[in-house]
């Protein structure tokens, strides 16, 4: 069965520190998609990245970077030089495309607090 | 600004009331979703519409009734709700034209519902 684990419930860092949010997933399918979403206090979930199971290249977008490792079933997210505006809840999600499911399984989320 | 618009942003209703939540997107997406999110929890899937047809109902009580009048609109009709139904209700859409579950979800800001 699908499962997404975000073991870090809450992280507090001081502005300009780097922070890594962990995501570990479980799936039996060989074809799947992983996502990260940001949920600021306003409530809307904002899409950050999608990665399919055949693409293990790491990605960098500005201060954000993602490390996808199939060997450890992890898809970790690093924010470099964190800013107060990064304060939000971050969700990792998994979708199994091969089985035709329409379901996105969300992890429990990590609340990031960046202190000025 | 989000491309998925939800109204109203806030709703307070009594247990005997009938109300509706509305969601609209003009991105040409063919899959639309309702999620329920309680405080400090991840979004929970309620319903999925694919090409205006109900594809998934996650055993949601009948006091919640979804409707998809056309590909751009999604409604959630509420009747005889309970106080425990108080939550943030999120609408989302995805492309859905190459297999649902492969594309990212685009979320609205949500409708915060309070049932008295």
Image (tube, rainbow, N blue to C red):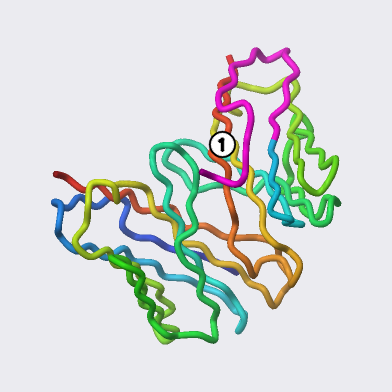
Q: Position of residue A103 (x, y in %)?
A: 66, 60
- Name above or below for residue A92 compared with residue B46: below
Q: Which residues are magenta?
A: B1-22
Residue beneath disc 1: B110
Q: The C terminus of chain B appears in which quarter of the rendering? A: top right
Whether B4 is among the magenta residues is: yes
- Name above or below for residue A51 compared with residue B116: below
Q: Quadrant of residue B51?
A: bottom right
In this view, the residue in front, B78 or B90, is: B90
Query: Residue visible at 47% across and 39% down?
Result: A43
Query: Residue visible at 67% across and 73% down?
Result: A97
Q: Quadrant of residue B101?
A: bottom right
Q: Position of residue A27 (x, y in %)?
A: 56, 75
Dot 1 falls on a residue whose secondary structure is loop
- Name above or below for residue B27 compared with residue A97: above
Q: Is residue B17 left or right of residue A86?
A: right
Query: Residue visible at 60% across and 57% down?
Result: B105
Q: Is residue A62 left or right of residue B8?
A: left
In this view, the residue in front, B81 or A32, is: A32
Protein chain holding label 1: B
Q: Quadrant of residue B96?
A: bottom right
Q: Position of residue A18 (x, y in %)?
A: 19, 64
In this view, the residue in front, B109 or B40, is: B109
Query: Residue visible at 45% across and 85% down?
Result: A56
Whether A98 is among the magenta residues is: no
Judge the density around disc 1: few (<14), some (14-19), many (≥20) Cα neighbours within 10 Å: many
């Amino acid at each position: 069965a699908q499962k997404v684990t975000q073991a870090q419930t809450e992280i507090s860092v001081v502005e300009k520190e780097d922070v890594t949010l962990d995501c570990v997933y479980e799936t039996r399918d060989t074809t799947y998609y992983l996502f990260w979403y940001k949920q600021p206090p306003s409530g809307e979930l904002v899409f950050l990245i999608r990665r399919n199971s055949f693409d293990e290249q790491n990605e960098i977008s500005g201060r954000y970077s993602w490390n996808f490792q199939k060997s450890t079933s992890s898809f970790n997210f690093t924010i470099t030089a964190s800013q107060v505006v990064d304060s939000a809840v971050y969700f990792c999600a998994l979708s199994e495309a091969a089985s035709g499911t329409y379901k996105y399984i969300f992890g429990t989320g990590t609340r990031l607090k960046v202190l000025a | 600004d989000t491309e998925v618009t939800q109204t109203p942003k806030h709703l307070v209703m009594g247990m005997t009331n009938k109300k509706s939540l509305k969601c609209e997107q003009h991105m040409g997406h063919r899959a639309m979703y309702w999620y329920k999110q309680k405080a400090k929890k991840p979004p929970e899937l309620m319903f999925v519409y694919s090409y205006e047809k109900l594809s998934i109902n996650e055993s949601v009580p009948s006091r919640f009734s979804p409707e998809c009048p056309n590909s751009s609109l999604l409604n959630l009709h509420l009747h005889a709700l309970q106080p425990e139904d108080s939550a943030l209700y999120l609408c989302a859409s995805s492309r859905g034209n190459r297999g649902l579950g492969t594309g990212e979800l685009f979320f609205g800001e949500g409708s915060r519902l309070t049932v008295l």
